[in-house]
Image (tube, coloured by chain):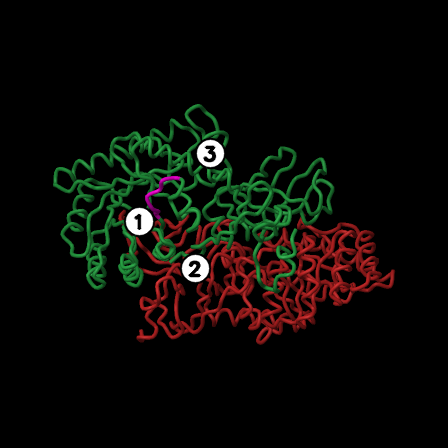
Chain colours: A red, B green
């Protein structure tokens, strides 16, 4: 470790988990680590898939909340832009230089609508979802006020059970209202089946997606019949993208987690019955943690608890280790079963968290590593941007 | 709303959920709201209890991670200082002016030990927990290097099953090593029974604490016999403080959640069988959320999901409403059952999160409200300080 890379010489209160050039062994824990080789392979692979299937790929920025990762996805993965879920996230991506940004969500608060309508002035195409005809007038007024154009996707609830309308008639009615409104442009359909992405069985996922595709096709047919053919039909995730890509009706994907992988996605099965983290995608995203107590012979305590991850989708697993198991998570501690007493105080482990999105959201930095060295630090640019 | 309190006039990317002076109705969601009247009543009540029982109260700063809340606890609640779980948190509290800070956890990484040993130079008393005799030499060397004194609590695992030793002999051995080490001072015992705090039944909690108290008394007797009487015997939480206060062996409490309350603590029962959020403590801590879609008649979608809270201890409840229920949480959405169709798009609701500590840790700001107005914004000063 060089003199200029000694973290303990930094000013009190200046917290970064690592500095570029540092050995991986000197990274401060707990923190997020990206395996840059694995990340790049995942990004290239999905980019090639989308290209081969004639699909646009609008990567989901709500997963990583990072301008740097989004730019990498554009540069080596052919991404056309990002989607995200909040206006404050969209602001971060637009300011960071992303030129095509979809807020794949409804925006109803007057102050947020106003902020959204200002964003096209920064040189980006801005699209937002609509599921209520009353929202059309609100968006139109704000776009008119700022002399901008907001593009709109009508959102179909094709199984997620959250936002979105459920009939072709409702889609058409909202699309017509958008088409007629000043300052707005009808740009297409949002149809993401979120509820099926984590079903283990490929066949169970296909069954749900078949229903979704039928709903979307019905809506598209209705729009075409009314002279409102959608430019974009957008959706798809890491557990479904091959269904949308082969549907003949979608033309844009919105995958997020494929780039990082996590424990909950990793355990779903591909069409050959193999876990998708055992061939389709690589684990590129880890919580680095350190053993800080081993006062009992058969259990070690590590420094990554609920403040370092979200456990909504289950506990993390310990990457590359069969002999030890993360069995309990409290605020600042993880309890690791170590029946053979293998772990030592100070030892570092890579955890694969249950759910990548809300885990990334509790950290300030990604530490990018390659060949045992810290290559880069990327801020979690939109961390906490929940407005 | 005055001109200077219009959030939509702020620069793009400048995110605060509110500004002082603003009406509560204009706060941007999702965000954390503190009911300042309720917060102050909780803080005063615990302060009076501790004083009446001759106990020091070292409030747990890892719960709120806020210098402002800690100072309020000192000013109106008689708190003697804080405890926290990480060196980076301790740095925030010391820089914020807290003069007595316990890291109620082990510190084993060399860079972290070095940073910890520098903190007394900033004018604070610094105490740290030890559960391994090898750690004594590490701490001593760092204190010697920086010409400071680190005080040490020997940690007893009295039931939490995490860090800490389990026999009076081990306590004494470590205390002797601390006492003999240059740069260190043996200051007492850490004995927090974390695992029992959330047991519903008062009697079940008492049973666990009786065991803990017996262990602690045994250790204290051993120390006294060796001429190492502990100055401080510290522990206790919101579900147990009356047991420690009446034990005759503890002299310092470490309560945290009493000040804010949450859904998981709220449902435990006092000795009269009443929920502790129905009299003992008030809900002072909320996630403010807004309905942003109601495309289905019987369910509303709000804007507070996993990025706005931790659901490790269950879903939030909707404060003051019996007619609607938060039933599902995804990354950015909450699904609310609204069987009678009472909610309107744009309507705001107060959620009481399952677990206050990791929920606070995903937000940047506390919005303090009183009488329908925003009175203050406090940063979540140590948010993300996990190192």
Nearer the observer: mark 2 or 1; the answer is 1
Label drawn at residue A287: 2
Asked whether residue A232 is in view, the answer is no
Classify residue A305 as left or right of residue B243. right
Q: Chain of mark 3?
A: B
Residue to which mark 1 is pinned: B100
Asked whether residue A40 is in view, the answer is yes
- Quarter assignment of residue A86: bottom right
Residue to which mark 3 is pinned: B281
Of residues B84 and B192, the one nearer the viewer is B84
Nearer the observer: mark 3 or 2; the answer is 3
Q: Residues within 10 Å of mark 3 (few under 14, many from 20)?
A: many
Of residues A257 and B64, the one nearer the viewer is B64
Q: Chain of mark 2?
A: A
Classify residue B24 as left or right of residue A2. right
Image coordinates of residue B265 in percent, x first then y, are: 46, 37
Whether A315 is drawn above or below A128: the answer is above
Magenta run includes residue A253: no
The range drawn in magenta is B77-83
How far apart are labels 2 and 1 at the CA level? 31 Å
How far apart are labels 3 and 2 at the CA level? 36 Å
């Amino acid at each position: 470790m060089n003199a200029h890379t000694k973290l303990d010489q930094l000013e009190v209160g200046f917290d970064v988990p690592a500095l570029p050039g540092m050995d991986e062994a000197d990274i401060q824990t707990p923190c997020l680590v990206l395996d840059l080789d694995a990340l790049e392979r995942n990004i290239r692979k999905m980019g090639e898939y989308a290209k081969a299937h004639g699909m646009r790929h609008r990567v989901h920025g709500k997963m990583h909340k990072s301008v740097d990762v989004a730019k990498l996805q554009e540069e080596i993965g052919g991404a056309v832009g990002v989607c995200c879920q909040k206006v404050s996230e969209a602001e971060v991506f637009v300011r960071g230089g992303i030129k095509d940004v979809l807020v794949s969500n409804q925006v109803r608060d007057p102050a947020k609508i106003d902020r959204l309508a200002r964003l096209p002035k920064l040189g980006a195409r801005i699209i937002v979802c609509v599921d209520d005809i009353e929202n059309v007038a609100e968006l139109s007024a704000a776009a008119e006020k700022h002399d901008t154009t907001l593009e709109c996707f009508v959102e179909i609830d094709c199984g997620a059970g959250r936002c979105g309308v459920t009939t072709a008639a409702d889609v058409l009615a909202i699309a017509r209202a958008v088409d007629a409104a000043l300052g707005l442009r009808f740009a297409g359909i949002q149809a993401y089946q979120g509820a099926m992405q984590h079903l283990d069985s490929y066949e169970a996922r296909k069954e749900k997606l078949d229903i979704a595709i039928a709903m979307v096709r019905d809506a598209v047919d209705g729009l075409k019949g009314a002279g409102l053919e959608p430019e974009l039909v957008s959706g798809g995730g890491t557990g479904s993208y091959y269904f949308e890509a082969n549907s003949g009706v979608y033309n844009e994907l919105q995958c997020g987690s494929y780039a990082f992988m996590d424990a909950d996605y990793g355990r779903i099965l591909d069409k050959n019955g193999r876990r998708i983290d055992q061939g389709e995608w690589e684990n590129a995203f880890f919580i680095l943690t350190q053993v800080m107590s081993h006062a009992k012979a058969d259990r070690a305590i590590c420094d990554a608890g609920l403040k370092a991850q979200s456990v909504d989708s289950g506990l993390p697993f310990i990457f590359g280790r069969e002999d030890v198991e993360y069995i309990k998570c409290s605020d600042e501690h993880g309890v690791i079963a170590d029946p053979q007493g293998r772990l030592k105080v100070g030892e570092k482990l890579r955890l694969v968290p249950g759910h990548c999105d809300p885990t990334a959201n509790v950290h300030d930095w990604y530490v990018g590593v390659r060949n045992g060295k810290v290559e880069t630090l990327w801020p979690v640019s939109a961390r906490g941007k929940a407005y």
